[in-house]
Image (spheres, helix red, strand yellow):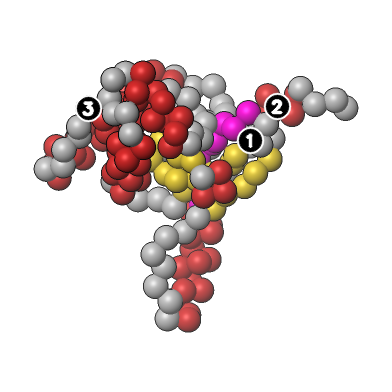
Amino acid sequence: MTRPPEMTEPVGFAEHDHAACTASAMAAAEARCRDAGLRFTPVRRRALEILLEEHRAMGAYEVLERLQQDGLGSQPPAAYRALDFLVGQGFAHRIEGLNAFVACARPGEDHIPGFLICRSCSKVAETVSVPARRILEQAAADSGFRIERVLVEAEGLCTACRQGEAP
């Protein structure tokens, strides 16, 4: 299938080199922090690694539990501060519909992410919602509105979960 130039393949459901995906995201985060003079603390680093381990949404308490197992923070504020930092720097996204977080599949890119969320396995695929961005930017310009944040989330079933359904 040929995609329009503004569309890109969603990242999360398809088979891919996950080690390269993770290494690339970590390198982008490290470079951004270094270039901007930001502290990429062990807790922030590990929180991003936890999100990168799977392409699924994770709640703050699930991240906190993993941080605790690693001896990196025992109180909820540790996880929330790390996740807020990651979202603020574009290394992760908050999935509002799930009250959860997912690592950014395109760190360092200026994009409005669109999320395809599997309601069965909780995996999340990130795609770029360029057409939605253009429509919203035009509508905002026409009405004098300044967009501060756009959220595009779609819920359904991924291929693997659909294959497990009865006909």
The location of residue 52, given as percent across then percent down, is 40, 27
Q: Are marks 1 and 2 in contact (CB under 8 Å)?
A: yes
- Left or right of 69: which side holds 164? right
Q: Which amino acid does label 1 sit on?
A: Cys
Residue at x 34%, y 25% (from the top left corner): 67
Q: Say if the magenta span includes residue 127.
A: yes
The residue wearing badge 1 is 118
Residue range corresponding to the magenta coloring:
121-129
- Left or right of 45: which side holds 56? right
Residues packed near mark 3 inside 10 Å, few (<14), some (14 to 19) or many (20 plus): few
The residue wearing badge 3 is 42
Q: Which amino acid does label 3 sit on?
A: Pro
Distance CA(mark 3)–CA(mark 2): 35 Å
Between 51 and 69, the one lying in front of the other is 69
The residue wearing badge 2 is 161
Q: Which residue lies furthest to the bottom in this view?
A: 143
Badge 2 element? helix
